[in-house]
Amino acid sequence: MKQSCFLLSAVCVLLTVLAWAQKPENPPANQPAPHSTIAPDESSSRATLIDLSPPKDDSLSHPNSGVADDVLETHPWNPMKSMKAVEVGDYYFKEKNYKAALSRYEEALQWKPLDAIATYKLALAQEKLNRLEEARTNYAEYLKILPEGPYAEDCHKALERLGKPTTAPRTNQKP
């Protein structure tokens, strides 16, 4: 019994020594360095830096990539922020602060272009602010988005009241 325990202990020690001997000195390049080798004021992300520079012939393949005119600022599509902006716009509209309501409805359309409800409410605010050409355009835009929508009849009445738009309806399509 003592002999088998001794033999088992010797095998364990031998396996431990072999495992320790096979442990690499430096971690592989794709793994971060252990925390003990990083200075306290140094970021651990430096151990896994990735080269993000463009390829050498990139300027030849894309000659206009540095020109600012080809960049359009866009908002990501976010229907929840759009819905919140419409909700706040409705509050301002009820308070008869049409300028603030208009701003919120425009913001809603930035977060969710072609939102029929925001387009309709934007037209209402524009009409209250006597921006009749823009109101006509947005009433027509609502009918283009939802021809049979809940505010379609109101839009038809508003267009009759204000006259036909002289400009084409805007299209807020994402690029």
Image (cartoon, grey):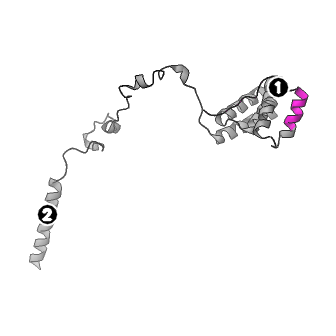
Query: In this orientation, which residue lies closer to the viewer: 154 or 34?
Result: 154
Q: Who comes first in sequence, dot 1 or dot 2?
A: 2
Report which residue position mark 2 lands on.
13
Q: Is residue 167 left or right of residue 78?
A: right
Q: Quadrant of residue 80?
A: top right
| Secondary element at image label 1 | loop
Residue in the picture at 14% in, 58% down: 18
Q: What secondary structure is found at the residue carrying circle 2?
A: helix
User: For mark 1, what is the residue?
Assistant: 165
User: Which quarter of the figure is the N terminus placed in?
Assistant: bottom left
Query: Residue 32 magenta-drawn?
Result: no
Say if residue 90 shows up in the picture. no
Measuring from the top left, give residue 103's x and y in whole percent.
72, 28
The kind of residue on which mark 1 rests is Pro
Look at the image and give the residue range highlighted in magenta.
154-175
Say if mark 1 contacts mark 2, CB within 8 Å: no
Residue 21 disc label = none
Q: Is residue 70 left or right of residue 88?
A: left
Estimate how packed mark 1 is, as few (under 14), some (14 to 19) or many (20 or more) residues with alpha carbons within 10 Å.
Answer: some
The residue under label 2 is which amino acid type?
A: Val
Question: Taking the image as drawn, is residue 169 in sight?
Answer: yes
Rendered position, 67 above or below 91: above
Q: Give the alpha-carbon distance from disc 1 to disc 2, as whole Å.
A: 90 Å
The residue lying furthest to the bottom in this view is 1
Query: Closer to the observer: label 1 or label 2?
Result: 1
Q: Which x, y percent locates residue 87?
A: 73, 39
Give the class, few, some or many, for how many residues have Cα within 10 Å of label 2's Cα (few <14, many ≥20). few
Residue at x 89%, y 34% (from the top left corner): 157
Q: Position of residue 70 (x, y in %)?
A: 54, 23
Residue 120 vs residue 164, the one in the foreground? 164
Relative to residue 70, is residue 29 depicted above or below? below
